[in-house]
Image (cartoon, helix red, strand yellow):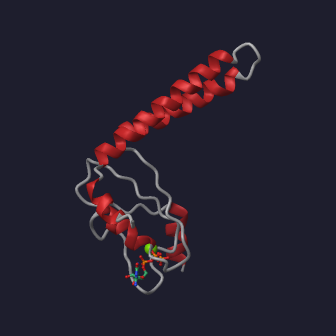
């Protein structure tokens, strides 16, 4: 029987996904802790203690919904279109001509009411010269 993924996706909430991911990260964290304690004597325990710390840090990111998503594709592949769809409004220009062209970092800031574009100084100088 065919699985209707789009119908399934409509039933998934961000909170449910967040809780699932936190639950999984907690299990991994606990496994890393056990490994680091069990392997303390032979020196490899340190490596697992470091993994445990990294997982705890990622768990914090998921708790705060501070997620990093990379969107990489050739020019005009629809990167901006998909980002706009995720964000829910036309944040990035999306047309048939070259648009975003430079690697762009988008950071969510709950204190802002409208987007701000920050262009690095050397990049702005290059644009001015051009
Ligand atoms: N048919 C079709 N067109 C799409 C789709 N996604 C994007 N487009 C169109 O493709 C064109 C380029 O989309 P953009 O989102 O600007 O692509 P981009 O990868 O951000 O482009 P650059 O930032 O210039 O590299 C636009 O005219 C979009 O409307 C899609 O899924 N189907
Ligand atoms: Mg773009």
What is the quadrant of residue 96 in the picture?
A: bottom left
Q: Position of residue 43 (x, y in %)?
A: 75, 19
Q: Residue furthest right?
A: 42
Tell me if residue 5 comes above or below residue 75 in the rendering.
above
**Which is more toward the observer, 78 or 102?**
78
Task: Give the side of residue 5 with respect to residue 26, left or right.
Answer: left
User: Residue at image x 42%, y 47%?
Assistant: 67
Q: Is residue 64 visible?
A: no
Tell me if residue 125 comes above or below residue 116 in the rendering.
below
Q: Is residue 10 visible?
A: yes
Q: Position of residue 126 (x, y in %)?
A: 55, 72
Q: Position of residue 36 (x, y in %)?
A: 64, 20
User: Residue at image x 46%, y 55%?
Assistant: 69
Q: Quadrant of the C terminus?
A: bottom right
Tell me if residue 19 comes above or below residue 117 in the rendering.
above
Q: Position of residue 22 (x, y in %)?
A: 41, 36
């Amino acid at each position: 029987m065919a699985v209707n993924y789009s119908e399934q996706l409509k039933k998934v909430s961000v909170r449910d996904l967040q809780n699932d991911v936190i639950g999984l990260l907690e299990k991994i964290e606990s496994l890393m802790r056990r490994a680091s304690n069990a392997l303390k004597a032979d020196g490899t325990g340190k490596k697992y203690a470091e993994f445990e710390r990294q997982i705890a840090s990622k768990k914090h990111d998921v708790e705060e919904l501070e997620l990093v998503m990379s969107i990489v594709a050739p020019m005009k592949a629809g990167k901006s279109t998909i980002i706009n769809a995720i964000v829910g409004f036309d944040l990035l220009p999306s047309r048939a001509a070259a648009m975003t062209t430079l690697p762009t970092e988008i950071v969510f800031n709950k204190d802002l009411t409208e987007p701000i574009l920050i262009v690095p100084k050397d990049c702005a100088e290059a644009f001015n010269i051009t």
